[in-house]
Amino acid sequence: MLTRKPIVNKFYEYSDTIVKLKKISKNSNRIIAERLDSGDQIVLPYEQSELLLRRIYTVGEVSKIVERRPDTLRKYEKKDLIPSPKKFGDKYRSYVDWRYYTESDVYDMIEFFNNRIPGRPAQNKIDNKIKTIEQKVKLHMRGKNV
Protein backbone atom coordinates (compact mmCIF):
# COMPACT_ATOMS: atom_id res chain seq x y z
CA MET A 1 0.00 0.00 0.00
CA LEU A 2 2.98 2.31 0.46
CA THR A 3 4.15 3.43 -2.94
CA ARG A 4 6.69 5.85 -4.32
CA LYS A 5 4.47 6.83 -7.26
CA PRO A 6 2.74 10.18 -6.86
CA ILE A 7 -1.02 9.93 -6.28
CA VAL A 8 -3.61 12.60 -7.06
CA ASN A 9 -5.46 14.14 -4.07
CA LYS A 10 -2.85 12.98 -1.57
CA PHE A 11 -0.64 15.12 0.67
CA TYR A 12 3.13 15.48 0.29
CA GLU A 13 5.93 17.48 1.85
CA TYR A 14 7.62 19.59 -0.77
CA SER A 15 10.53 21.78 0.23
CA ASP A 16 9.27 23.79 3.22
CA THR A 17 5.54 23.30 2.74
CA ILE A 18 2.77 20.74 2.40
CA VAL A 19 1.12 20.29 -0.99
CA LYS A 20 -1.80 18.35 -2.38
CA LEU A 21 -1.40 16.85 -5.84
CA LYS A 22 -4.07 18.03 -8.24
CA LYS A 23 -3.07 16.56 -11.60
CA ILE A 24 -0.46 14.15 -12.90
CA SER A 25 0.46 14.05 -16.58
CA LYS A 26 3.06 11.44 -17.48
CA ASN A 27 2.94 12.37 -21.17
CA SER A 28 3.90 15.98 -20.58
CA ASN A 29 6.18 15.03 -17.64
CA ARG A 30 4.55 17.28 -15.07
CA ILE A 31 2.70 17.25 -11.80
CA ILE A 32 0.46 20.10 -10.72
CA ALA A 33 0.33 20.54 -6.96
CA GLU A 34 -1.43 23.07 -4.75
CA ARG A 35 0.32 24.64 -1.79
CA LEU A 36 -1.94 24.31 1.23
CA ASP A 37 -0.68 27.49 2.88
CA SER A 38 -1.19 29.93 0.01
CA GLY A 39 -3.30 28.02 -2.53
CA ASP A 40 -0.70 28.68 -5.25
CA GLN A 41 -0.14 26.02 -7.87
CA ILE A 42 3.28 24.51 -8.41
CA VAL A 43 4.39 22.61 -11.50
CA LEU A 44 6.88 19.82 -10.84
CA PRO A 45 8.54 17.31 -13.17
CA TYR A 46 6.97 13.84 -13.07
CA GLU A 47 10.30 12.15 -13.73
CA GLN A 48 12.09 11.58 -10.43
CA SER A 49 9.33 13.31 -8.48
CA GLU A 50 10.00 10.88 -5.64
CA LEU A 51 13.14 12.90 -4.96
CA LEU A 52 11.15 16.12 -4.53
CA LEU A 53 8.01 14.89 -2.81
CA ARG A 54 7.79 13.01 0.48
CA ARG A 55 4.44 11.36 1.13
CA ILE A 56 2.60 12.08 4.37
CA TYR A 57 -0.35 10.06 5.62
CA THR A 58 -3.52 11.08 7.42
CA VAL A 59 -4.79 9.06 10.38
CA GLY A 60 -7.44 7.41 8.21
CA GLU A 61 -4.87 6.30 5.64
CA VAL A 62 -2.58 4.89 8.32
CA SER A 63 -5.44 3.02 9.97
CA LYS A 64 -6.14 1.27 6.65
CA ILE A 65 -2.45 0.43 6.16
CA VAL A 66 -2.01 -1.11 9.63
CA GLU A 67 -5.55 -2.53 9.58
CA ARG A 68 -6.58 -0.93 12.87
CA ARG A 69 -9.28 1.60 13.68
CA PRO A 70 -8.28 5.26 14.13
CA ASP A 71 -9.38 5.20 17.78
CA THR A 72 -7.05 2.22 18.36
CA LEU A 73 -4.17 4.29 16.99
CA ARG A 74 -5.11 7.18 19.28
CA LYS A 75 -5.18 4.81 22.29
CA TYR A 76 -1.64 3.60 21.58
CA GLU A 77 -0.47 7.17 20.91
CA LYS A 78 -1.70 8.24 24.35
CA LYS A 79 0.24 5.36 25.89
CA ASP A 80 3.29 6.52 23.89
CA LEU A 81 3.68 3.11 22.25
CA ILE A 82 3.52 4.35 18.67
CA PRO A 83 4.73 7.63 17.15
CA SER A 84 2.57 10.69 17.75
CA PRO A 85 1.28 12.46 14.66
CA LYS A 86 2.26 15.95 13.62
CA LYS A 87 -0.38 18.62 13.03
CA PHE A 88 -0.78 20.65 9.87
CA GLY A 89 -1.11 23.71 12.13
CA ASP A 90 -2.23 27.32 11.79
CA LYS A 91 -0.22 27.83 8.61
CA TYR A 92 -2.75 25.67 6.74
CA ARG A 93 -6.12 27.31 7.37
CA SER A 94 -8.44 24.56 6.12
CA TYR A 95 -6.44 21.79 7.78
CA VAL A 96 -5.59 23.31 11.17
CA ASP A 97 -6.60 20.28 13.28
CA TRP A 98 -5.63 17.62 10.78
CA ARG A 99 -2.93 15.19 11.89
CA TYR A 100 -0.42 13.37 9.72
CA TYR A 101 2.35 10.79 9.88
CA THR A 102 5.57 10.47 7.93
CA GLU A 103 6.53 7.30 6.08
CA SER A 104 8.95 6.42 8.86
CA ASP A 105 6.12 6.67 11.42
CA VAL A 106 4.00 4.32 9.33
CA TYR A 107 6.78 1.72 9.16
CA ASP A 108 7.25 1.98 12.93
CA MET A 109 3.54 1.27 13.42
CA ILE A 110 3.64 -1.67 11.01
CA GLU A 111 6.50 -3.11 13.04
CA PHE A 112 4.67 -2.49 16.32
CA PHE A 113 1.46 -4.22 15.21
CA ASN A 114 3.28 -7.10 13.46
CA ASN A 115 5.34 -7.87 16.58
CA ARG A 116 2.43 -7.55 18.97
CA ILE A 117 0.87 -10.73 20.38
CA PRO A 118 -2.92 -10.54 19.96
CA GLY A 119 -4.82 -10.43 23.23
CA ARG A 120 -1.83 -9.30 25.27
CA PRO A 121 -1.50 -5.70 26.43
CA ALA A 122 1.20 -3.79 24.62
CA GLN A 123 3.93 -2.58 26.94
CA ASN A 124 7.05 -1.90 24.94
CA LYS A 125 7.51 1.39 23.19
CA ILE A 126 8.67 1.24 19.59
CA ASP A 127 12.39 1.80 19.11
CA ASN A 128 13.79 3.20 15.92
CA LYS A 129 15.45 -0.09 14.99
CA ILE A 130 14.91 0.24 11.27
CA LYS A 131 18.01 1.81 9.79
CA THR A 132 17.88 1.21 6.05
CA ILE A 133 15.24 1.19 3.35
CA GLU A 134 16.08 -2.48 2.70
CA GLN A 135 15.05 -3.32 6.26
CA LYS A 136 11.83 -1.36 5.78
CA VAL A 137 11.01 -3.27 2.60
CA LYS A 138 11.68 -6.61 4.30
CA LEU A 139 9.43 -5.58 7.18
CA HIS A 140 6.68 -4.49 4.80
CA MET A 141 6.93 -7.73 2.80
CA ARG A 142 6.83 -9.79 6.00
CA GLY A 143 3.61 -8.01 6.95
CA LYS A 144 2.14 -9.03 3.59
CA ASN A 145 3.29 -12.68 4.15
CA VAL A 146 4.96 -12.75 0.73
Image (cartoon, rainbow, N blue to C red):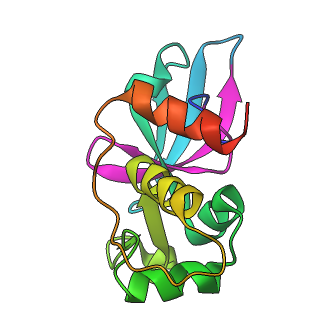
Q: Is residue 115 left or right of residue 90?
A: right
- State which quarter of the image contains the C terminus: top right
Q: Nearer the viewer, residue 25 or 41?
A: 25
Q: Nearer the viewer, residue 127 or 25?
A: 127
The quarter of the picture where residue 110 lies is bottom right
Residue at left offset 60%, top offset 13%: 29
Res. 2 visible in picture: no
On the image, the x and y values in percent for residue 6 come to: 60, 33
- Residue 33: within the magenta? no
Q: Is residue 128 left or right of residue 13?
A: left
On the image, the x and y values in percent for residue 117 come to: 59, 69
Residue at left offset 40%, top offset 89%: 78
- State which quarter of the image contains the N terminus: top right
On the image, the x and y values in percent for residue 96 come to: 43, 80
Residue at left offset 47%, top offset 82%: 76
> Does residue 104 sit above or below 71 in this rendering?
above
The quarter of the picture where residue 108 lies is bottom left
On the image, the x and y values in percent for residue 103 come to: 45, 48
- Residue 15: within the magenta? yes
Q: How many marks?
A: 0
> Does residue 6 sit above or below 64 in this rendering?
above
Q: Is residue 136 left or right of residue 58?
A: left
Residue at left offset 52%, top offset 30%: 137
- Magenta residues: mostly which secondary structure? strand
Residue extent of the magenta highlight:
6-25
